[in-house]
Image (cartoon, rainbow, N blue to C red):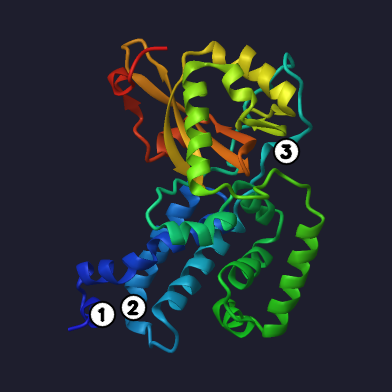
Amino acid sequence: MDLLTAARDGDEHAFGRLVEPHRRELTAHCYRILGSAHDAEDALQETLLAAWRGLSGFQQRSSLRTWLYRIATNCCLRQARNRPQRMLSFDHGPARRPGDELGAPVEGDGWIEPLHTPEVDPEQVRQRREHIGLAYVAALQRLPPNQRAVLILRDVLGFPAAEVAGLLDTSRASVNSALQRAHATLATAPAAPVEQVAAPKGKERTVVAAFVTAFDAGDVSGLVDLLADEVRFTMPPLPAWFDGRADVVEFLSRNVFALPWRARPARFNDRPSLACYLPEADGELLLSAILVITLDGDRVTWLASFIDPVMLARSPLPQRISPKEFPADR
């Protein structure tokens, strides 16, 4: 008995094996539409539940993958229509100067959140990395939900216009019109830092290792040569952000490295990242920030720090670790 037949007969294990190859890409799809790892996981679970319940109605006129994308897209559109537009710090207000007030945390679900992407298949990473970068996902959020879905299905996933029309229960002409409007909107969107030249994998590892060493030691001088002139530093839910190497370095020196951070490598949005920990009263280290690093060649152009305790508590990273996991104290 094949997996589809077994799943239709009520075998949950067979259903799990049937959909597992699609889970990672469906999560990324939901994330692009919703801009939140938490919302994407909710949409994925809703998608899989709907697929399980509706499997008897899957008549194989399309592939299982296409059918799952149809369910996932419509789940995400229902969520997106009831959510505020998510943004980056650049969208919230102008850059501040070191020494300025950082402002009160902006409450609610208004910020783009990072997506944990442990590296499994390097080829998948190469194909997907530009399509789940923070800047790209933020740009998508400027579009109405339907245009967002059309652009992703056409430009990212490569579905033909006629197939997208079927997925969204609309006409091919409507799909083409929505895609044109989406392209026009993105063409005028404010720029956020993006990777212009991806560093070779070995070079990226070297840069990130040097960055981790300097960050973990609170060594600002060790970071300076790794930063591009136009580097930016953001830290939602605080509204303040800093633009340019001089201001970023001064803020790091004055504020960030005044605390005894310990860092270990991680990966979010298919970018090198740091899981950043601070000591608690009992000596254990608490996850206190996720730092996503955007590179242009061998220079860092954006340090995206996420410090919302609610978001951090939902992260799959270890919440508390022993200081013994680090080689030595600072």
Mark 1 is on which residue type?
A: Arg
Residue located beneath label 1 in the image:
8
Mark 3 is on which residue type?
A: Phe
Which SS class for mark 1? helix
- Furthest toward the left, the residue is 1
Q: What residue appears at the point 74 percent right and 22 percent down from the top-left corner? A: 246
Q: Nearer the viewer, mark 3 or mark 2?
A: 3
Q: Residues within 10 Å of mark 2 (few under 14, many from 20)?
A: some
Residue located beneath label 2 in the image:
55
Are the residues tagged 1 and 2 within 8 Å (C-beta)? yes
Rendering coords of residue 252 (x, y %): 62, 19
Which SS class for mark 3? helix
Q: Residues within 10 Å of mark 3 (few under 14, many from 20)?
A: some
Q: Quadrant of residue 131?
A: bottom right
Q: Nearer the viewer, mark 1 or mark 3?
A: 3
Left or right: 20 as drawn, with respect to 257: left
Q: Quadrant of residue 55?
A: bottom left
Could you give the CA–CA distance between mark 3 and mark 2, rounded to whole angstroms?
43 Å
Which label was assigned to residue 308? none
Residue located beneath label 3 in the image:
90
Q: What residue appears at the point 79 percent right and 59 percent down from the top-left corner? A: 187
